Amino acid sequence: QEDDDSCSDYGSRDKTGTALGRTVPDGNVVFPDIFHTDNLLFYERFQAYQDYILADCKASEVKEFTAEYLEKVLEPCGWQAVWHTNVFEVLVEVVDVEYSALKAVVQLGGPFLYESRDSTFNLECIQELLELKEYQIPLQELWVVYDESGEFDQTALAVEHVRFFYKHIWRTWDEEEEDDFDYFVRCVEPRLRLHYDILEHRVPSGIVADYQNLLSQCEELYRKFLDVRNSISSSDSDSEVDNVSMVEGLKLYEEIEHLKQKLKLIENPLLRYVFGYQKYSGLQAKGPRPMGTKITHVVSSTMMSSQLQSLMRDRLCPESFGEELEIQFHSDPLAAVNACYEGDTVIICPGHYVVDGVLCIADSVELEGYGLPDDIVIEKQGKGDNFVECTGANIRISNLKLVQHDAVEGILNVHHGKTTLENCVLQCETTGITIRTSAELLMKNSDLYGATGAGVEIYPGSTCSLLDNGIHHCKEGILIKNFLDEHYDIPKITMVNNMIHNNEGYGVVLVRPAMPSDVKDASEVRTKGIFFLFLEERKTEPPQAGDGTACLEAFRQEELPACVTADLELYEPAEVSEQTEGNYEIANELGATSVKKSQMHKKRLSELGITEADDNLMSQEMFVSIVGNQFKWNGKGSFGTFVF
């Protein structure tokens, strides 16, 4: 590793002994040990690229700045390296360096050592290849041979920085990007952070897979684009073929730009989670059993006879159901869930269950703890992205405590369908619950805490009802993702009598892009047809016509769970307090943002020449019911807006 002194003067030769480690090259041939430089920390690479290599250069100047850096730190000759390719490795000696080309001039080292994965590739082939390359090898293909004197430490580090940069940071299209921005800030830093976030398992595997796929697609399309562009530029004619090529090139360019924007979203550590990713869930619903039978699965590692008697009396008695029950016994919840078909029930008896896998629920099933949540604990063991994945049409989970460890993604993901969570305790580690687009969550009388992200993430187009819950000791309590994009539907959000407290940031945070003008008057929100309910009186005077009463009538027309309606009808208006004033603020801001979406939608229709009322517009508007929630001791307050 570099110390501060070596960084300041690019590595003086006054120090004695190497500061770098050594490693043995892979393979059957006994090559000399090489410097171990691929284990550098994030801040070491960050400092090298920012302070000594790239500084404030533009994308078009990257190669020039890199060459200048190499001239200062790279020994011009007298060092050995292992030339490593996909086909062979061979020991070479560096006799000169072509700094501007980022290449070393080499000759075969003595003694001659090589190893080939192709039996036909021999010494003669290597000689011919070197002659063809004029004995110039890209620096990133060289691994510097270890030298304990310390004389070649900076050479080894410089080669490592070049190799890492062109393998993980540089994109073939970067040079064509606009040069108005600092290349390090715009590209290097976010890509470097993403690389280390992936190494340290801070990015869900779904996002990693998406990123790699997007990168491969973009590189392939860019190669095709270059071929088309070169074919046009090399032709002087104005033929029909050239015109077709021009259209093809423009189409490729648009596709490339679209993919590049997606890559930038993932590279940005904030927007990566703000926008999420469209995760394909491979969960396939089994549907009903061929004979139409439904099975009750009982989970218990051990069971006392008295407990079995109670279970039979309370949950398994045929008289209670009017028919015989078919029962299967399991020792762990994962096996029981995997055995479920449509309509099955899983009853989990008291105990501490450790699962090493994902609870994937693709059918409409019910998971019920037989007892109090603290007595029925399901703990996730081992590193993994997910804990509970829900895609079933109607899933119910109750009376359980879920404990998450070594996670990358949240504790529960609702991808499709409706999931009801009642009387549960969720001890999170990363994000808590995620409700993705078109999915629905009803969470009642539950306690969620410990998320290093948001306790609840609400995606555009989802439906989320939170009733009588505690959400606390998370980074953010509830995060509502941006829904202003024209492709996104507005979410429906109901929050009634929740206690949201002791979160590091805001109790509730809305993510949205900067807007030219925001709707400031709450009355304008109501006149635009945005349905939100705020039953608490801001002042002592009675509400005016078209105010709370109109909102309530609009609310009752909505198709909401009966339990939600019941809770609202029981709630009486009260004087606003410091703990509950966030209700109005949240509803007002969400309503205003929804108005902006309606305005944007109408503007797009107008630009297309469509002036008639959109029949689908009302269905796209937000229903916001923010009633009786208490916000206490949240680090940044009850509500905030993240503007990007």
Image: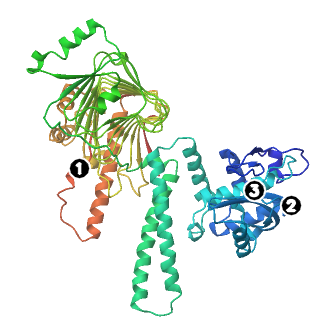
Q: Residues within 10 Å of mark 1 (few under 14, many from 20)?
A: few
Callout 3: SS = helix
In the image: residue 538, left or right of residue 448: left
Q: Residues within 10 Å of mark 2 (few under 14, many from 20)?
A: few
Can residue 643 be spotted in the picture? no
Dot 1 amino acid type: Thr
Dot 2 amino acid type: Gly
Asked if the residue under mark 2 is in contact with the one under mark 3, i.e. CB atoms within 8 Å, the reply is: no
Give how far across and how far down residue 50 sits, in percent: 69, 55
Q: Residue at x 25, y 32 (%)?
A: 340
- How far is disc 3 from disc 2 in space, using C-alphas? 16 Å
Which quarter of the picture shows residue 379? top left
Q: Which mark is residue 90?
A: none
> In this figure, which residue is indicated by the disc labeled 1?
527
> In this figure, which residue is indicated by the disc labeled 2?
78
Give how far across and how far down residue 503 sits, in percent: 46, 30
In the image, residue 421 sits, relative to residue 312, either above or below, namely: below
Callout 1: SS = helix
Give how far across and how far down residue 342 sits, in percent: 20, 35
Can residue 47 be spotted in the picture? yes
Which quarter of the picture shows residue 385? top left
Callout 2: SS = loop
Is 71 or 519 nearer to us in this picture?
A: 71
